[in-house]
Amino acid sequence: MPDVMHLIKIHASPEQVYQAITTADGVRNWWTRDTTLDSQIGGAGEFGFNGHQFVNKVKIDELTPQTRVRWTMISSGLPAFDGTTIAFDLRANRGDTMLAFAHRDFTRMDDSFAAATTRWGYYLLSLKQYLEGRQGTPDPDGVDL
């Protein structure tokens, strides 16, 4: 099965990166302003895009502070996303954080997979910008991808 994977260095502590990924206020600054997120294992997250026309719903599977976050996509606007898993692995690196990102378990490489690859790259750079003191570019503030 194909996976979307990215590795990015962020000039911020693992604690700051973890907070930006695991809280609704954090996510609103880099991924989408239309966010609700329950920050506990077994909780849910809902991330709306394009005026809530496209909604990703996740279940929080793992929260290891400053180290790992893992979600399962339980529903989305695209059947290819349902059942996929999203993981953020954080490693301290001389005052910075190395973020290894993976969106796994796609059933095939198609336009949905290609779009996910592009969008995740864009939003991870938005996360980097936000944490490094610049403004992130979450939906709907970013470009039309």
Image (tube, rainbow, N blue to C red):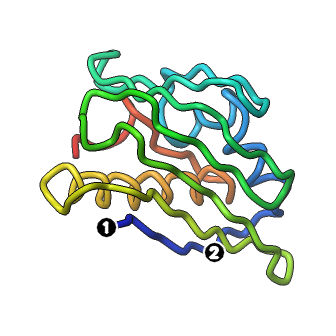
How many dots with numbers? 2
Q: Residue at x 40, y 33 (%)?
A: 139
| Relative horizontal placement of residue 134, taking residue 125 as reference (left or right) | right
Q: Are marks 1 and 2 in contact (CB under 8 Å)?
A: no
Per the image, label 2 sits on a secondary structure element best described as strand
Quarter of the figure with the N terminus: bottom left
Q: Residue at x 57, y 56 (%)?
A: 129
Query: Which amino acid, mark 2?
Result: Lys
Taking depth in this image into account, of 99 and 85 the one nearest to the observer is 85
Q: Residue at x 59, y 37 (%)?
A: 29
Which residue corresponds to mark 2? 9
Answer with the quarter of the image where residue 14 lies: bottom right
Q: In the figure, 98 relative to 115: above or below? A: below
* Circle 1 residues within 10 Å: few <14, some 14–19, many ≥20: few
Q: Measure the alpha-carbon separation of dots 1 and 2.
A: 23 Å
Answer with the quarter of the image where residue 21 lies: top right
Which residue corresponds to mark 1? 2
Taking depth in this image into account, of 132 and 93 the one nearest to the observer is 93
| Relative horizontal placement of residue 58, taking residue 116 as reference (left or right) | right
In primary-sequence order, the first of circles 1 and 2 is: 1
Mark 1 or 2: in front is: 1
Answer with the quarter of the image where residue 28 lies: top right
| Relative horizontal placement of residue 44, taking residue 15 as reference (left or right) | left
Per the image, label 1 sits on a secondary structure element best described as loop
Query: Which amino acid, mark 1?
Result: Pro
Taking depth in this image into account, of 87 and 22 the one nearest to the observer is 87
